[in-house]
Image (cartoon, helix red, strand yellow):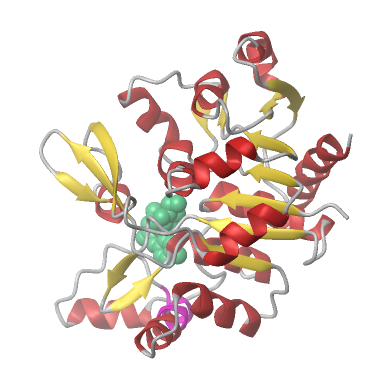
Amino acid sequence: MCKVLALAGGVGGAKLVFGLSKTLNPKQLSIVVNTADDTIFHGLYVSPDVDTVMYALAGLTNKKTGWGIDGDSFKTLSALKNYGSEAWFQLGDLDFATHIKRTELLRSGKSLSEATDHLTKSLGILHSLIPMSDDPVRTIAITADDDLEFQDYFVRQKCKPVLEGIRFDGIKQAKPSKAFVDKLSEANALIICPSNPVVSISPIIELPGIKQLINDFSGKRVAISPIIAGRAVKGPAAKMMRELNEDVSSIGVAKRYIGICDWIIIDEQDSKEAEEIEKLGINVYVSSTIMNSDQEKINLANDVMSLIKN
Ligand code: FO1
């Protein structure tokens, strides 16, 4: 049986995971999600990438934003604002229930993996959704003026400060979650979703021991480039890569994934990059990687799976 482990960040990753979940049953597909974007808002533990993937699998996603819950309202946030709380991070009323329950579970002594399991099962999700670690890892954007917490940089400051570097606080002390290591050893294929390579995939791969396990992985390892025609499909990946002096192209993405993937899927608009990428020792598969509709998500998932099976 094909056992696939997908590594995912937020919106781009969630789209492909949705497609994969329609193609692969819960015994065939598990998903490990970045938790370095996690933070505390209003005293509640918020895990944005876990929630983005969870809502996608539950069919709850707000399709306009790619995160949050479809049709959610913001009355609680507006009441909090009235009390003087900061309200730049858009937490919806239904979304709040997720953060309240997660925080309650964590305070009762459950791990983030256990809390995530509780939330996903309650939403009727059968696939395993695994936080990359139960220990705190926090992405910090190093900018000329300040070191900024990721959501401060990303949402409050809209990625405007020029990036001088990125660091993942706590990563050296963090352990990959047990389920992550178990699923990685059981899997016979690895998918690196089209998520931001700098801040979504890097923290997963840089957890102690993980790069080595992925290096030694004997099955097929397939990455999907989130950069198309020099631009990120969504989010700040292109701006970040440019400011970090990396090629803003699938070639730049492939350079990051040397030793981590055997194949990279690039969009048909970038087919001319294939030769350069192959010189890096990575095979290239050209496909249509834009996922605006559910059908396009399923189509790309099917492409990834046919590459894995052949
Ligand atoms: N992204 C935004 O750009 N603005 C927001 O106000 C915002 C709120 C938010 C609330 C819950 C959640 O799960 C995600 C949310 N996101 C928001 C997305 C999130 O900041 C990013 O997608 C990830 O952290 C990057 O992968």
**Residue at 60% from the left image edge and 32% from the top image edge:** 225
Q: Quadrant of ligand 1?
A: bottom left
* Magenta stretch contains residue 247: no
Q: In this rendered view, identify the residue nearer to me: 138 or 266.
A: 138
Q: In this view, does 94 lie to the left or right of 140?
A: right
**Residue placed at 57% from the left, 47% from the top?**
12
In the rendered image, the vertical position of residue 81 relative to residue 12, given as above or below: below
User: How many marks do you count on the picture?
Assistant: 0
Residue 61 visible in the picture? no
Report the side of 55 relative to 84 (left or right). right
**Can residue 307 be seen in the rendering of this structure?**
yes
Q: What x and y, as percent, mark residue 37?
A: 37, 56
Please name whichever residue, 210 or 294, is drawn nearer the observer in this view of the structure: 210
Height in image: 161 above or below 13?
above
Figure quadrant of the C terminus: top right
Left or right of 243 on screen, residue 99: right
Residue 124 place in picture, x, y as percent: 70, 80
Say above or below: 117 vs 19. below
> Which quadrant would residue 237 be assigned to in this image?
top left
| Residue 274 percent coordinates (x, y) | 68, 14
- The stretch of residues the image draws in magenta is 92-99
Image position of 7 with respect to 214: above or below: below
Secondary structure mostly seen in magenta is helix
Q: Identify the residue at horizontal 42%, vertical 74% (top origin).
A: 92
Rendered residue at 37%/65% (across/down) = 135
